[in-house]
Structure formats: structure tokens, C-alpha cells
Amino acid sequence: MPKKISEQTKFAGRIFKIKDVKVRHSNGKEFSYEVMSAQGGSKGAMVAAVDAKGRVVLVREYFPGINRSELCLPKGRADEKESPVSAGRRELEEETGFRAKNFRFLGKYYLSPGYSDQLTYLYLATGLSKPRNPLLGDELEPLKVVLVPLSKAVAMAKAGKISEARAVTGLLLAEQVINGAKRQSKKMKNAKK
């Protein structure tokens, strides 16, 4: 098993820092890796919020890394002392104006563990409502909120029209959970007949 022998911050920006991590491998060879970490913590949350009509709440957001806007699920970093589920609830409200009665954990996934320690917790949110005075976010540009039938959003993801990898994962997992719940409900109804 490789063993970390040193770590040194090489660059610290406003959002990320780059560390040089030196590792000794089991064959005795040493190698330095560059690892990106978020300032203030590397945990974040992403929310697949589905309304009573089966529509998923998406946001159109600008991504500077690819210099274009794309549809994705509401998301954001957890503050230092904030739990991922609290961050998910906050980000859902800040980015979309929705609150959710129900939050279900879908899993946690590393963005790209070869060079980043960023960990995203995915949630399915249901029982949506619009509060009178929603939390205001820190977005530099207003986000456009788009409600799309979940099946259509999944088809868009499969066709590459939604390409943010965490959003694709969240949509696929949300569809799986919702379709499983529908099948279970149908079985229970049929059993009562």
C-alpha cells in the first residue's frame, strides 16, 4: 500500500489550493502528486429535487472551465461546520427558491480522486414548496431555474446534453429510486385487489 510521506501547499487561491503530495509506493519508489483541495473543506452537496408532477429542478449555470452555461442540479460546497445535508437544503433554496420536506441520501462520490479530494453527497429531495422569502445565494449571475420531467432529463444526460458528471449520476440515481418506489406502490395496490 502506498504511504504518504510529505505534503506541501504549492498554491493557495480563493477557492482551491494545490498540494504537492509525496508518496512512497510498495516497491520503494517515491513519486510526487499534485492534489487539488477546496479552501475551507472539500465536502459538497448536490440535490435532485423532484416535484409532485415528476419534474426535476435544474439550474442553468455558467461553468468557466468550459466557458459555457449548462443545465445541472443545484449544488454547492458545505461550509466548514455545516453538514452535507444542511448544505444541500441551503443550496436548493438559494439556487432555486425551493424547500423540500423530504431529503433522501443517494450516495457520496469523489469528483476525480486521482487529483482531487472533493467529495459530493447526492440527495433526492421531494415534497417541494416555495417559501415566501427564500434564502439568497452568492451567485454572481442569476441562475435560470428549469423544471423538466425526470425521464426527459435522464434522456438529456444520456445524450450528453447534461454533461456535468455529478448531475448525470444524481439524475440516474434519482430515476432509479423513484421508479423503484413506483413499482413497489403498484405491487402493493395489486396485492390489495
Image: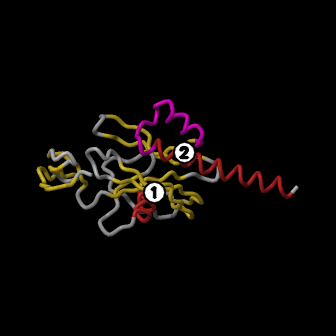
Identify the disc placed on residue 147. Answer: 2
Q: Label 1 amino acid?
A: Leu
Q: Is residue 22 left or right of residue 183?
A: left
Dot 2 or dot 1: first in sequence order is 1
Write the start and end of the magenta stretch as one range. 149-167
Q: Who's the residue at 55% across and 49% down the image? A: 174
Quadrant of the drawing holding the C terminus: bottom right
Where is residue 142? Give x, y as percent: 37, 48
Residue 152's place in the image compared with 184, above or below, is above
Q: Is residue 37 magenta?
A: no
Residue on which disc 1 sits = 92
Q: Based on the displayed image, in which of its 4 quarters is residue 72 positioned?
A: top left
Q: Is residue 35 left or right of residue 76?
A: left
Residue lying furthest bottom in this view?
81
Q: Is residue 192 left or right of residue 169?
A: right
Give the Cα distance between marks 2 and 1: 13 Å
Predominant secondary structure, magenta span: helix
- Give the structural element (helix, strand or loop) at label 1: helix
Q: Label 2 amino acid?
A: Leu
How many circles with numbers are drawn on the protein?
2
- Give the structural element (helix, strand or loop) at label 2: strand
Q: Who's the residue at 56% across and 64% down the image? A: 101
Q: Who's the residue at 40% across and 52% down the image? A: 75
Identify the disc placed on residue 49. Answer: none
Where is residue 160? Give x, y as percent: 46, 31
Where is residue 124? Give x, y as percent: 53, 55
Residue lying furthest front in this view?
27
User: Callout 1: few (<14), some (14-19), or many (20+) C-alpha neighbours within 10 Å?
Assistant: many
Q: Are marks 2 and 1 in contact (CB under 8 Å)?
A: no
Residue 163's place in the image compared with 120, above or below, is above
Q: Nearer the viewer, residue 49 or 160?
A: 160
User: Callout 2: few (<14), some (14-19), or many (20+) C-alpha neighbours within 10 Å?
Assistant: some
